[in-house]
Image: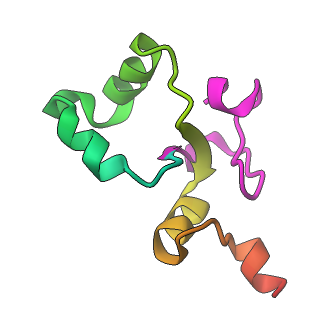
Amino acid sequence: MKRYSNGTPKCSCCGETFLEFLTIDHTNNDGNNHRKTLKMWERTGPHFYRWLRRNNYPEEYQVLCWNCQWSKFIHGKCECPEHLRNK
């Protein structure tokens, strides 16, 4: 998380810092295709973080909180609750 947040883990959309709410996001929206190339055990949790480290932290990832990641999935871009409330 620190690697993709320039030191302090935080959501790149809304700035959430509560670690338990943060996730790794595929910036190109190609996570499903990428998961198909990984071994089953590399797809989730600590195994995926190890994969990131072994592959020198590829640039096509970012940190998003669960809300922003879900919003990105639904809207095609990060429209976090804070942004939606202010529309």
| Above or below 28: residue 84 | below
| Above or below 86: residue 34 | above
| Above or below 24: residue 52 | above
Q: Which residues are magenta?
A: 1-25
Count the numbered circles shown.
0
**Would residue 78 be found to the left or right of residue 33 on screen?**
right
Closer to the camera in the image, 22 or 60: 60
At horizontal 27% and vertical 36% (from top left) the residue drawn is 43
At horizontal 56% and vertical 30% (from top left) the residue drawn is 59
- Which residue is outermost to the left? 40
| Above or below 14: residue 59 | above
Percent position of residue 35, x then y: 26, 41
Closer to the camera in the image, 3 or 31: 31
Q: Is residue 80 magenta?
A: no
Q: Check the picture and name the quadrant holding the N terminus.
A: top right
- Which residue is outermost to the front? 28
Q: Main secondary structure of the magenta part?
A: loop
**Would residue 21 be found to the left or right of residue 56 on screen?**
right
At horizontal 36% and vertical 48% (from top left) the residue drawn is 31
Q: Is residue 4 magenta?
A: yes
Percent position of residue 37, x then y: 20, 35
Percent position of residue 26, x then y: 47, 46
Q: Check the picture and name the quadrant holding the C terminus.
A: bottom right
At horizontal 42% and vertical 25% (from top left) the residue drawn is 49
**Would residue 7 be found to the left or right of residue 34 on screen?**
right
Percent position of residue 28, x then y: 48, 50
